[in-house]
Amino acid sequence: MINSKIRIAAHATALLTIFIWGTTFISTKVLLGDFNPLEILFFRFVIGYVVLWGVYPRFVKCLKRRDELLFAAAGFCGVTLYFLMENIALIYTYASNVGIIVSVAPFFTAVMAHFLLKDERLHLRFFIGFVIAIFGISLISLNGSFVLALNPLGDLLAVLACVCWAVYSILMRKISELGYPVVGSTRRVFFYGLLFMLPALFLFDFQFDLERFADGINLSNILFLGFGASAVCFVTWNWSVAVLGAVQTSSYIYLVPAVTVSAAYLILNENITVGALIGALFTLVGLIVSERGFSIRKKV
């Protein structure tokens, strides 16, 4: 059984991961001046993959063909599909819609985990916490603008992105039980994510044009996304999933909008309303309630 100190560390790493992921929009927003979404996505994961090779320069050999399929599926769902759908959704619908919908990912994760994982069980408190958190997330994402409209294609892509992330969480939970090193496992997932991303390079207006990184601002932001948000955060997130389970770790996603709005206020001097602050409080309460709304069965 995992001791309390390790569990506390896992909570801390999950929180740190969400803090970094919540601020990535700033770097992405800056880079969008010279790069399109697919270029940012591809370059950040290439950097992440190289960094993980430097940290763990050993080849991870899969013991079974089934294990290899799990890594491939995780890369396809958690890297390629999730980020492509999220980025494309932003083209067809409001950012506030995407912010709210993507934050529903813990709900999809919880339902899938309940039926697909034998050691994670849900309780009513999880769903109560989910409703509270989504109410708070809605207040944060609107942030005083109250612009929320249905845009079927974009909203559907955002929902599908949630489903992809939920599948990724379940797959990483299963991979964590196989005994492979976390860094090596994450690097293998990145490999498949990049591999499945290659066809998209030919479908969209992708340009390698590395001269754009001669600009120090572009270089610093892509390094932050590649090293911090990809290499470091995916390792810490996957480790937290291994320790806490897919459901409890995914609940921290509720905090992303609160971190994003706070970062925009502190770094970009964007406006923050009383409604957004109240929403952040509701989100935190929802997270606390949800954290207590499930249990992990002890393995004999």
Image (spheres, helix red, strand yellow):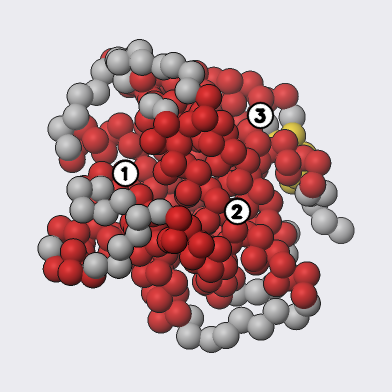
Front label number (2 vs 3): 2
Q: Is residue 63 above or below residue 146?
A: below
Name the residue tied to disc 2. Answer: 77
Front label number (1 vs 3): 1
> Which disc number belongs to residue 25?
1
* Amino acid tagged 3: Phe
Q: CA distance from mark 2 to mark 3?
A: 25 Å
Which sits earlier in the primary sequence, circle 2 or circle 1? 1
Q: CA distance from mark 1 to mark 3?
A: 28 Å
Q: Are marks 2 and 1 in contact (CB under 8 Å)?
A: no
Which sits earlier in the primary sequence, circle 2 or circle 3? 2
* Amino acid tagged 1: Phe
Residue 100, percent across and down? Answer: 47, 27
Q: Is residue 195 shown left or right of residue 245?
A: left
Q: Is residue 7 shown left or right of residue 65?
A: left
Name the residue tied to disc 3. Answer: 126
Front label number (2 vs 1): 2
Residue 10, percent across and down? Answer: 53, 54
* Amino acid tagged 2: Cys
Specify the quadrant of the image occupied by residue 141. Answer: top left
Q: Residues within 10 Å of mark 2 (few under 14, many from 20)?
A: many
Specify the quadrant of the image occupied by residue 73. Answer: bottom right
Question: Mark 3: which secondary structure?
Answer: helix
Work out whether residue 14 can be spotted.
yes
Q: Residues within 10 Å of mark 1 (few under 14, many from 20)?
A: some
Residue 197, percent across and down? Answer: 50, 61
